[in-house]
Amino acid sequence: MSVATTWPLSALLVWLAAWLAHLSLRGLGSDVALAAGAAVGVALALLYRQRWRRLIAALGFPVSVLLLGWRPGGGGWIWSGGWLLALALLWWLYPRRAWSEAPVFPTPRGALTALPGHAPLPSGARVLDAGCGAGDGLRELLGVYPRASVEGVEWSRPLALLARWRAAGARVRRGDLWADDWAPFAMVYVFQRPESMQRVWDKACAELAPEAWLVSLDFAVPEQLPVASWQLPGGQNVWLYRPGRNAASKTAN
C-alpha cells in the first residue's frame, strides 16, 4: 500500500481533489464549480469500503465550504485556502491518532432505554463509555442508570471538554480507551466500528469481571452470541454481552 492510499492522508487528497475541481471550473459559474467539487469528493469517497470513511471523505469539501460562509459569487483567496482551514479545524477536533478509531457518530436519543431491563446494575456501579465523543452516550447512560457512577474516556481533547459540559453528571477523562483499565467497571459501553469489535472483545474478556457487561451499539462481536440484542426504531441494534463469563469458562476448561 502506498503512502497516498493510507488513512487519513487519502482523505486529505480527496478533499484537495474536490477543491481543485471546484477552482478549475469557477469560470463556468459558482453553481457549476460547487457541484463539480462535491461530485469529485463523493466519487472518490465511494472507493472506501468503510461507511464512516466514505462519510468523512465526502463531507470534507461541502463542510469546508459552509465553514467559510459560502455565498453566491463570493470568492477570492479564501476559496483556494478553504480546504486548509477545514483540515486545521478537523485536525484540532479529531487528532490523527484517533482517525483509526470510530468517527464521531452520536448515540441516538432513547437508544439505551431498554438496557436496565436486561442488565440491572446496583447503586454506585461504575459504567464506562469507552470513546465517549461529544457525550451523547454518556447522557443516555445517565438517564437509564441515574444511581450509577457514569464515566467517559475520550482521546480528542476538544470532544472530551464538550462531553464534560454536555454530560454534567458524568466524570470525563481525556485518555486512550485501549490503554484504559476496564477492570473496575460493571459495564462498558462502546460505539465503535466493525473492524475494532474483535479488539474490544479481547480487551473485555481480559479485563472485565465475570458479572460485568459489555454493550455495543450497532456492531456485534464476530462469532459471539450476545446475552440479548434488540433493534431500535431507526434500524440500529444494541448488543449485550458478558465477556468476563466467557473468559472464566475458557479458563475453567
Image: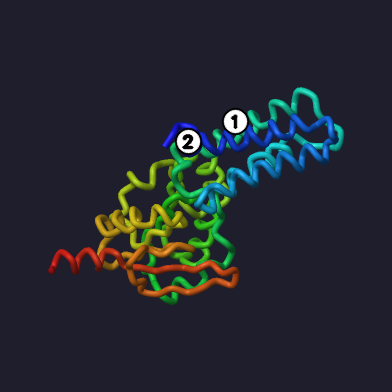
Question: Residue 56 appears in which quarter of the rendering?
Answer: top right
Residue 99 image point, x, y percent: 48, 41
Mark-to-mark CA distance, 2 and 1: 11 Å
> Can you identify the residue that label 1 sits on?
88
| Label 2 neighbour load within 10 Å: few <14, some 14-19, many 20+ | some
Residue furthest to the bottom in view is 117
Q: Depth check: 6 or 155 in front? A: 6
Q: Depth check: 222 or 208 in front? A: 222
Type of amino acid under label 2: Arg
Type of amino acid under label 1: Ala
Is label 1 in a helix, a strand or a loop?
helix
Question: Residue 90 appears in which quarter of the rendering?
Answer: top right
Residue 197 image point, x, y percent: 38, 57
Q: Does residue 46 appear left or right of residue 102 in this picture?
A: right
Residue furthest to the left in view is 253
Task: Tell me if residue 82 can be seen.
Answer: yes
Sequence-wise first label, 2 or 1: 1
Is label 2 in a helix, a strand or a loop?
helix
Residue 229 image point, x, y percent: 43, 73
Give the residue drawn at x 52%, y 71%: 113
| Label 1 neighbour load within 10 Å: few <14, some 14-19, many 20+ | few
Residue 233 image point, x, y percent: 59, 72
- Placement of the N terminus among the 4 image quadrants: top left
Q: Does residue 82 appear left or right of residue 207 in this picture?
A: right
**Where is 85 relative to 55, above or below?**
above
Task: Tell me if residue 150 can be seen.
Answer: no
Give the residue drawn at x 50%, y 43%: 160
> Can you identify the residue that label 2 sits on?
96
